[in-house]
Amino acid sequence: MYLDEPLKRDFYIEMAKMEHWSARILQDRIDSMLFERTAISKKPDEVIKNDLELLKKEGKLTPDLVFRDPYLLDYLGLRDVYSEKDLESAILAELTKFIIEFGSDFAFMARQKRITVDNEDYYIDLLFYHRRLKCLVAIDLKLGKFKAAYKGQMDQ
């Protein structure tokens, strides 16, 4: 997919201003292809322009500016075969680096947070709060390719 370079430049400028990135962090974000991994880059140019205008004018983040896909977690040091529990433990051991990769304004709330729905217990692997979006972000860790059942599991 062709990415409009001026939009890409504007994205980095606005995010750097909002997040108070140093030159080193900005370069790290560019090198890690943050724009390409952010949901905004998968949208039509007009929607991207509207989201960036909202960011410029009102300093408001949209969920599409916050979340990216995929996340690069190479720094966790996991090799070859590992379990979801290993992934969760590695994330918690490197929580600062994980939050930096995840994005700013996230606050860690809980690990294996138990919730009860219709008298049945469920566990959220990792629970965060995003201060600017003012919402909870539940992370259910899964290894391998996405399966439709995973979405259904989160919708319960």
Image (cartoon, helix red, strand yellow):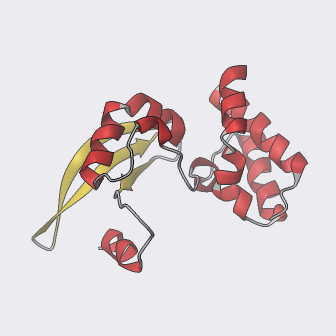
Identified at 32% across, 39% down, the residue is: 90
* Residue 90 in the figure: left or right of residue 131: left
In the image shown, does 83 or 44 lie closer to the viewer?
83
Please state the horizontal and vertical placement of residue 5, each as a whole percent of the image.
88, 49
Q: Nearer the viewer, residue 84 or 23?
A: 84
Determine whether, in the image, residue 62 is placed left or right of residue 115: right
Q: Quadrant of the N terminus?
A: bottom right
Query: Relative to 47, does residue 88 appear above or below in the rendering?
Result: above
- Asked whether residue 22 appears in the rendered view, the answer is no
* Name of the residue lying farthest toward the left: 119
Q: Is residue 139 visible from the viewing direction of this image?
A: yes
Residue located at (52% from left, 47% from top): 133
For the C terminus, the quadrant is bottom left
The image shows residue 100, relative to residue 110, as above or below, that is above
Q: Position of residue 126 (x, y in %)?
A: 31, 48
| Image position, residue 149 (x, y; %) | 35, 78
Q: Residue furthest front?
A: 80
Q: Is residue 97 left or right of residue 78?
A: right
User: What residue sits 85% from the left and 61% below the top?
Assistant: 2
**Where in the figure is residue 114, as x and y percent of width and height?**
17, 55
* 59 over 144 or under it: above or below: above
Task: Please name the residue shown 79% across and 34% down the image.
Answer: 13
